[in-house]
Image: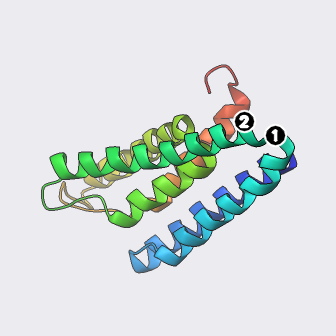
Amino acid sequence: MFYENLREGILATLFLTAAWRDLHFRKIPNRLLRSAAGLRLLFCLPETYLAGWKEMTIHILQDLGSGLLLMTFLLTVTWVCGKGKKLGMGDVKLAGTAALFAGLYRMLWVLLLGTGLAAAVLCLRMIGRKGSRRDTVPLAPFLLGGFLLEFLLRFSLPGLF
């Protein structure tokens, strides 16, 4: 339980720091993402000791696979659907790094909720005539919102998540 809570805290810190950097500088630094991935690999040692080598090896491979699968999916969507305004590579790497901590299923929920929040904000800006269809927004703050919403919904509706 301790390691799970610590992983949640690191994941929340990763999203919070990335959101702040994305809002202020429109860039998510690679150093932040590398540090988070290194911390995840560092956590594998005590988790392996507690769970056993075989179970933990399977779990680590699932986490790595989910991160790579999510990054591949986002890159494919960006390449196929993006015309001019594309999803930034920092956002793709952020989602992949976060999937190392949270797993594929949770990150898909975070992406769904986060992009839904971003779409709602853009629609409200267009209704208020302060924005247009060509506006771009930094995605990391909305991924933070999606993470927080998923975190709250997971405890409120345990059967859904």
Total tally of numbered discs in the picture: 2
Q: Mark 2 points at which residue?
A: 55
Instruction: Locate residue 101, reporting x and y percent.
Output: 62, 50
Residue positioned 73% across, 32% down in the render? 155
In the picture as drawn, the residue positioned furthest to the bottom comes out as 25
Q: Residue type at mark 2?
A: Glu
Does residue 142 appear in this view? Answer: no
Q: Residue type at mark 1?
A: Ala
Q: In which quarter of the image is the N terminus?
A: top right
Instruction: Locate residue 36, reporting x and y percent.
Output: 61, 66
Residue positioned 24% across, 57% down in the render? 129
Q: Do the residues labelled 1 and 2 touch (CB within 8 Å)?
A: yes
Does residue 14 appear in this view? Answer: yes
Q: In which quarter of the image is the C terminus?
A: top right
Instruction: Locate residue 80, reporting x and y percent.
Output: 16, 46
Q: Is residue 139 above or below residue 123?
A: below
Q: Name the residue under label 1.
A: 51
Residue positioned 31% across, 55% down in the render? 125
Residue positioned 86% across, 44% down in the render? 50
Instruction: Locate residue 114, reporting x and y percent.
Output: 46, 47
Q: Which of 148 and 102 is in front in this view?
A: 102
Alpha carbons under labels 1 and 2: distance apart: 6 Å
